Amino acid sequence: MTVSSYPSRRRVLQTGAMGLAGLSLGACGNAGSRPLLSSDTHPSDYPTVQAVRYMGDLLREETGGRLDIRIYAGGQLGSERDTLEITSFGGLDLNRVNLAPMNAIEPMTLIPSLPFLFSSTEHMRQSLDGPVGDAILQSLVPHNLVGLCFYDSGERSFYNTRQPIRTPEDMEGMKIRVQNSDLYVSMIRALGADATPMSLGEVYQSLVQGVIDGAENNWPSYETGRHFEAAPYYSLTRHVMAPEVLVMSLSRWNKLSEADQELVVNAAKESVPFMRSLWDERVEGAKTRLLAAGIEANEVDDLSAFQQRMEPVWDQFITSSQQQALVEQVQQIGRDLETRS
Ligand code: GTR
């Protein structure tokens, strides 16, 4: 499937046209000199947005303002799936999204999204900082996207309006919101719950109105989206550690000189450690604030029941020898880390 075959194409084009009309007002005329326009679903103070802003500062300093980034945060330009399509058409230059909305367009992006693949933050970071991460970034080029870097997204866990989750049976019949990815839909079904794909912006209202019973995300998004107000039971399943990715439209990339391409890649890479330190702080801060606000968090003593149910999910989505080889590399990195510790 290519980016342009997304189902909601008509709606996307409408959103895109509105977004672009707005964007062109602020642009300085020719595409070569205007800032790189960047989208993020999170608000201005979120670590991903701050990291891209940092990258823009670096570029501005290094080029005396010739290269710069203008960020449209808070989902102003639409959902991740929609803005991704706009980016692939070249209507947006940069986009920070999770890997989930790319799962349908590029099978290699399924790998870091696999439930229970990474055993720790270190395992995830080492895997994505090396050849596995490079191969996944590279796989985006045929979709008119240049993968610049990965950012952390931490551990995703389930939260809901009803009760603590300790076993898959506790989830039976619950309506759980997922990102727009078939992998997530299968994961929820394998746990005995009903999956409802929707964009992040719709989750709060859907929880409040009882359209869904729960969702799954990391601590910072659970806090930022105020989902905790409606769904105070946060159960630490830590089932997915799929990272965020920063992509550039291939058409804008091709308009840059080789020297500028190198500046962009280097600034993106430099923003990664900056983002990670903000991220670690944000996770701790969110956890402390949410516990103080009275949410009920619980550890899950036996994750094996959840893990076992994921076996058919892996089999369903890891179907090529290319994917299999990368999964094995990630697993080897995990074993090496364990031996060293
Ligand atoms: C967040 C992630 C977003 C988006 C969101 C979601 O953790 O940073 O990019 O994927 O989850 O659940 O839609």
Image: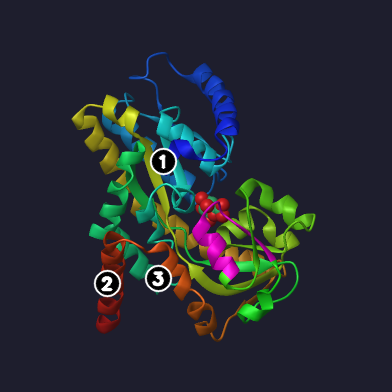
- Dot label at residue 100: none
The residue that appears at 27% across and 28% down in the rendered structure is 254
The reply to whether residue 174 is in sight is: yes
Direction from residue 114 to residue 211 in the image, left or right: right
Question: Is 67 included in the stretch rendered in magenta?
Answer: no
Q: How many marks?
A: 3
Q: Earlier in the sequence, mark 3 or mark 2?
A: 3
| Separation of residues labelled 3 and 2 (CA atoms) | 11 Å
Question: Which residue is the extreme one toward the bottom?
Answer: 301
Picture quarter containing residue 17?
top right
Q: Which mark is residue 117?
A: 3
Residue 165 lies, with reference to residue 159, above or below; the image says: below
Q: Which segment did they paint magenta? A: 175-189
Seen from the viewer's position, the closer of residues 101 and 243 is 101
What is the CA distance from the residue labelled 2 to the residue labelled 1?
31 Å
Mark 3 and mark 1 lie on one chain; the one further toward the N terminus is 1
Q: Residues within 10 Å of mark 1 (few under 14, many from 20)?
A: some
Mark 3 and mark 2 in contact? Answer it, CB < 8 Å: no
User: Which secondary structure lies at badge 2?
Assistant: helix
Mark 2 sits on what residue?
333
Counting residues from the N terminus, which is met first, the one under dot 2 or under dot 1?
Answer: 1
Cα–Cα gap, marks 3 and 1: 26 Å
Q: Is residue 115 visible?
A: no
Horizontal side of 272 relative to 217 (left or right) equals left
Q: Looking at the image, which residue is at 45% across and 64% down?
A: 241
Q: Nearer the viewer, mark 2 or mark 1?
A: 1
In the image, what residue type sits under mark 1?
Answer: Thr
Q: What residue does disc 1 label?
A: 2
Kind of element beneath mark 1:
loop
Residue type beneath disc 2? Ile
The answer to whether mark 3 and mark 1 are in CB contact below 8 A is: no
